[in-house]
Amino acid sequence: MTDNTTKHDTEAGAGPNERVIGTPSSAESDAIVAGAADPHPQREHDGPYPASETHKHSEEEQRRGEKVASLWFTIAFLAGVGFIVAFFVFPPEAIADPQIGQYSTMALGGTLALSLFGIGAGMTVWARRVMPHYEVSSPYDELPSPPEEKRSFGEFFMKGADESGFTKRPLMRRTLLLAMAPLGIAPIVLLRDTGPLPGDKLKHTMWEQGMHMVAEGTHRRLRAEDLENEPGGMISALPYVEPTPEHPHGLSLNEQAKTSVILIKMPENDWKPGMTQQQLNWTYNNIVAYSKICTHVGCPAALYERTTHRILCPCHQSTFDAADGAKVIFGPAHRPLPQLPISVDDEGYLIANGDFPTAVGPTFWDAEKGD
Ligand code: FES
């Protein structure tokens, strides 16, 4: 509050420790610095300043200020609504076009700037045309503040709130709240940019009953014999999907990343007792298929030690036991590699018997989807 028309100082003779809020005139400054008597001794006071002494503007001027401030708040509200409308007028597919994207940016930026400017302008008008203006000076005190000062501050604060017109001037108050409402909603609207909700996509892959398995890299359909001839061997496999011009191997990179499995031929008597009957039923002729995506943070877990049946992820050394349902035996992962149920078709080609029973890849809050 920087108006010089009214000056309030503390007790006459306040010394150099006096704090001045506002800009005193040079004569007043000299007097304070020199420890001289208060130049306005008749304005000594305790606590809040009476409104009659401090209001600079007449009631008429304040009313005009209220209207102008409310007008700015209304403009801010309309601009805030415009921001939300602009957000939906330009959907993500449309703004992929650079030209439309430019219009979208201008519309969003312009409406948001106008909304913020309107609130700022309204508050400035409020402070300058409605609130009282005066200078305040008071002596520095030792901390903590004595109870009288705390009480005085409380009274002063309440008085200030009253004088600000926030409670007394409903038009201005309501239009300010109205102007801020769209900005409050804007962050919620912006959540749309985080993309559509994943639904249960994270819990499923494109593996389904009867899908053939092909060798990763050669894209050759796999038969059980491809592994039977080398017990303890391992092959990386993917589902067979008809190639398209866009995806010569039939799968997008994203689909490959989710569906990749390792096929392991286990010597008959090496299964551990931890394997459930259901897990054994998901194997075919001691060939087992596990997700290749590490359940820690998703690296390909494709290093296999055939003598110990350990699957190792090279990223952080998580180790899984292929003979025991790919349970974690070392490292930061804490979920087994999901097992894919497999079988063969009439011609002996390896096929999936459905999707993974649990979500593949890095663990997330809701990774277990049950049977
Ligand atoms: S990603 Fe496999 S251990 Fe970290």
Image: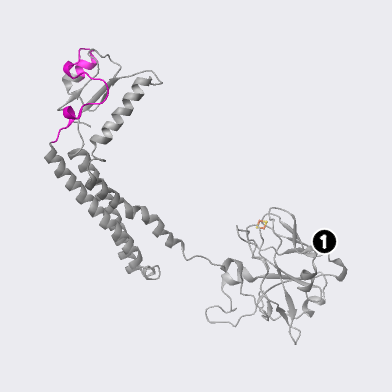
Tell me if residue 170 comes above or below residue 23 in the rendering: below
Instruction: Give the left or right position of residue 281, taking residue 186 as reference.
Output: right
Amino acid carrying mark 1 in the image? Thr
In terms of secondary structure, where does tag 1 sit? loop
Give coordinates of residue 260: x percent, y percent. Answer: 65, 70
Across and down, in percent, residue 230 comes to 82, 74
The quadrant of the picture showing ligand 1 is: bottom right
Q: Residue at x 40, y 67 (%)?
A: 92
> Which quarter of the image is occupied by the N terminus?
top left
Which region is colored magenta?
29-57
Would residue 131 be counted in the magenta stretch? Answer: no
Task: Count the marks.
Answer: 1
Q: Residue 195's spot in the image, x, y percent?
A: 46, 64
Give the image quarter of residue 100.
bottom left
Vertical comparison of 121 with 224: above or below: above
User: Is residue 52 one of those drawn in magenta?
Assistant: yes
| Residue most extreme to the right | 269
Q: Is 266 left, or right, of 10 in this rendering?
A: right
Q: Position of residue 308 (x, y in %)?
A: 82, 61
Which quarter of the rendered picture does the C terminus lie within? bottom right
**Which residue shows up at 53% across the image and 81% down it?**
245
**Residue visible at 77% across and 79% down in the picture:** 224
Q: Label 1 belongs to which residue?
A: 308
Label 1 crowding class (10 Å Cα cut-off): few <14, some 14-19, many 20+?
few
Query: 56 or 314, which is in the foreground?
Result: 56
